[in-house]
Amino acid sequence: MTALRLMVFIACLFFVAEVAVCSGGTDDAKRKAEDVFQTFKNTASSARVIKQRYVNPLLSNIPLYTIDSSESFNVQILCPSAKEFMTILAQPQSTGDINVKVFLDRDRDGVMDSEFTFNGISGVCANGFVRCDPGTWNGCGFYTFEYDGSVLREKGVSFKKLGGCFCINNSCGENLFWRNAYYILSVLGGAIVQEFQRVDPSFTVSSSVLEGTALKFYAQSLSNCFAAGGSSQVKNLTGYLKNPYTIQGDASSLYLTEVQNPESVTYAVEKFAESMNELVEEKTCTVRRVIETREYDISELFSRARDCKGDLPGPYICGERCVYFIFGVHQSEGNQGYAQIDFEMTPDFYDIIYVIEARWRTDTRGPYPCFDDDGYVKFYLNGVYAGGQSYGDSEAGCGCCGSAPSHWVQLSKDLIIPPSGGSSMNTLEVYAGGSGGGEGVAAGCRPVEVYFCLTEPFKGCYISRDYIEDTCEDLENDPECTLWEEKVDGVLTVQNGMRTGLYPLVKCETFCGEVICGTHWFVERKYRCRSSETDLAEAEKRLKKIYSTSTFEQSTGEITYTDIRKEGEMWSTYPSQKINVAENFNRESTECEYVCKVEVPEVGKDVRKDMDLNRNPKKVFVYRPCTPDEQGRYTCPVNPGERIISDCTCDSFFTEAAIVLQAMRLAGSDFICSSGVEKSL
């Protein structure tokens, strides 16, 4: 345990002791807490003491003592030393892809006896790899490893069978392997080790070492481990390997024993969980993808138009890919006739129209069956001139309606208002003029036909709305609520607040002839929300003040701070408050481990479920031990492309931990300990 971890652990014990005192309110509880803390300091005061007292007894015949030194016993765990059992050698290509050779010691006798080759690896997964066209993310195939006890081979699988994939070739960045060799080979080696352990689970990987472009794996055999002396409850590890079903029974038995023991950690955790349940409210919600459709008859689109007889204008079928409707333009002798038709345009109808044409004849329908006529017809779509034509006199004789010529004009589809998010309303206006023939017709109705030529048959169905119905948004944004359980399309993806690693399969559904595929059609969620009965706003205000004004003197272990307390409706200030958080605390300088914080570039592009590459990489930060030189100076080890965030330091962060814990203690003291009489801090 490093000095840093030791400091944090000591601070946590200090906080637990303080809370116990606060809750009990007795001198006896405080004394016990101080005794526990002092005992721990004496038995784990440094890395040297921890190694001597706790680590060495597990590896030799030295007795292991309890924390209070009241009892001792022998519990040595003996296993064969680790041996190199696999080496992965990478051969990077100019395309960024890698060829890999796997050397294996199958019987783990210390001699490599097998060699296997896998070429053209473009991406690495937690349980396999991806092979694409060199240097690209195209033409990809997906593979897992398969081992039969003697031969390691690749096995083609569906992409859905792989997990945790990321790209490593030039399509995702330059020199990715050289910057991340250890990580890439570790992930690839992990996939191979999984397959080895499936065949022979009696060994475990203990370490790995990178030498150039080769990563060596070392393992120990569990089948030869045994416990020397100690409690009879210590079992041979291979017993569970041979019969894993006994684990559940042993675990249940141990739990039932420990949960009844007030001195055990299990008992404390169980009681804490019960108290948490009293302050938690479960709330459920759903997220649903809703796709609404409209099915209709084409006559609905032109329901406002009327023909010369006052009837609906159709529509009429003029072929598998042709429909038309008729409307009338009423005209008196010597005057201009006019008609306005409002019609609806839907997305599915609009998309398949490629020509719109209009036709009329020179004869009229009305008091007289037929007469010779001359004049013009003009069309306007949504107020814009769309086409028209003039014609002359004597094109047909009286009583010769059948021989009267037809007049055609093509109207522009571009003048129709495109439907967006539904349908659109459009207006067609027609003007007809002329003086009439020698028969002296007083009035007439000119029939006009409008034809729509289509690229495919009309179906009368379209998606009117596609949206997400989310009743979880408020809970998701509530800092008091935590996602506790989630089912996505019937698959349990979150259980007890943790991801299960399961993911729903893509499901396809058909709407109006259009196939839509995806996941998250229906999501059921359960949140656990802390009760709003306790208002911590005032405690947070107090915490902020104490934290911002606290100073720590390491040599004395004393914190000085300014406190504020609400008395009635007024806040009072108490400066120069002091508390000793680490009396007689001194850290051995030789125990300090100098570390630095480094920003590591992304390994490669993460692969989404649909094989797209994630273009939004996240920053990755790591802490590394610093390297000392002969003069005692420390250097932070960085690789090309990495950036130092915090240089080598021996800061234990004990100051911040102690300040925060003390502030939390003070914030809670009022509503836990107060009895109406002011208490000293």
Image (spheres, rainbow, N blue to C red):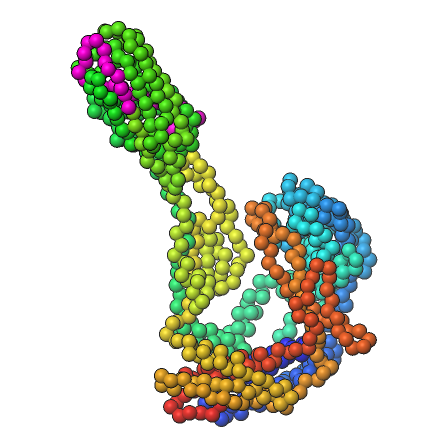
Q: On the picture, is 233 further left or further right than 346?
A: right
Could you tell me residue 178's position as x and y percent?
A: 74, 55
Magenta highlight on residue 601: no
Residue 481: percent from left, percent from top? 43, 66
Q: Residue at x 42, y 76 (%)?
A: 536
Name the foreground residue: 213 vs 598.
598
Residue 316 visible to the viewer:
no
Q: Nearer the viewer, residue 65 or 125?
A: 125
Q: Is residue 449 magenta?
A: yes
Observer able to see residue 338 = yes
- The residue at 62%/44% (across/down) is 157
Q: Is residue 404 above or below residue 119?
A: above
Q: Is residue 250 above or below residue 106?
A: below
Residue 56 quadrant? bottom right
Relative placement, left or right, of 470 versus 631 is left
Along the line of sight, which residue is nearer the eye, 248 or 672? 672
Q: In the figure, is residue 441 to the left or right of 493?
A: left
**Magenta highlight range:** 431-459
Percent x, y of residue 474: 40, 61
Residue at 67% from the left image edge and 76% from the top image edge: 1
Name above or below for residue 364 compared with residue 160. above
Label total for image: 0
**Residue 491's x, y, as percent?**
48, 53
Determine the image quadrant of residue 234: bottom right
**Above-or-below relation of 419 to 434:** below
